[in-house]
Image: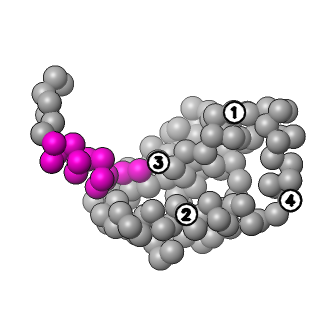
């Protein structure tokens, strides 16, 4: 598609509603890092419940959008589900998102291209 070419409404909807590759990006601990974030998340890290709910939400979204061929999760919490093996980039909450994390996410997305994959939720 040419750089300035406009998408038709149906093309736009297809790209938005039926994406080929998806990144699930956590904010706290990935984009917001450091001491203030650690104090805020201290209780969250004591239990798996929050990360399990988050994992279920991601898996449900993937199930609903079954044609996604590549997906990655940028998250500082362990999502505690085998479905995320090979898809999660676990960031350091003290450092946040790094170039290495971005490269790993790109590798994950490219590794799964062309193979529709919607894990069971």
Image quarter where the N terminus lies is: top left
Residue at left offset 67%, top offset 66% = 52
Disc 3 secondary structure class: strand
Local crowd at mark 1 within 10 Å, few (<14), some, or many (≥20)?
some
Task: Specify the segment rendered in magenta.
Answer: 9-22
Q: Determine which residue is flagged by label 1.
A: 32
Where is residue 101 shown, x and y percent of the image?
58, 40
Find residue 69 and report its image quarter.
Answer: bottom left
Where is residue 44 shown, x and y percent of the image?
80, 54
Whether residue 96 can be seen here: yes
**Residue 16 falls within the magenta-colored stretch:** yes
In this rendered view, identify the residue nearer to me: 42 or 21: 42
Q: Decide: marks 2, 3 in contact (CB < 8 A)?
A: no
96 up-or-down from 64: above or below = above
Q: Residue furthest bottom?
A: 120
Q: Determine which residue is flagged by label 4.
A: 46
Going by the image, does 34 lie left or right of 119? right
C-alpha distance separating marks 4 and 1: 19 Å
Going from N to C along the chain, the mark reached first, 3 or 1, is: 3
C-alpha distance separating marks 3 and 1: 17 Å
Here the colouring is one colour
Going from N to C along the chain, the mark reached first, 3 or 4, is: 3
In this rendered view, identify the residue nearer to me: 3 or 87: 3
Q: Which mark is residue 57?
A: 2
C-alpha distance separating marks 2 and 4: 20 Å
Q: Determine which residue is flagged by label 3.
A: 23
Figure label count: 4
Going from N to C along the chain, the mark reached first, 1 or 2, is: 1
Residue at left offset 30%, top offset 47% = 16
Going by the image, does 43 lie left or right of 106? right
Q: Which mark is residue 9?
A: none
């Amino acid at each position: 598609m040419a750089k300035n070419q406009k998408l038709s409404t149906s093309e736009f909807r297809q790209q938005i509603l039926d994406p080929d590759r998806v990144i699930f990006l956590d904010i706290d601990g990935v984009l917001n890092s450091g001491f203030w974030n650690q104090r805020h998340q201290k209780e969250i890290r004591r239990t798996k419940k929050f990360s399990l709910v988050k994992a279920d939400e991601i898996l449900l979204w993937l199930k609903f959008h079954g044609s996604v061929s590549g997906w990655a999760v940028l998250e500082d919490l362990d999502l505690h589900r085998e479905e995320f093996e090979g898809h999660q980039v676990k960031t350091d909450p003290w450092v946040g998102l790094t170039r290495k994390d971005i490269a790993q996410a790109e590798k994950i997305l490219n590794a799964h291209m062309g193979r529709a994959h919607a894990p069971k939720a």
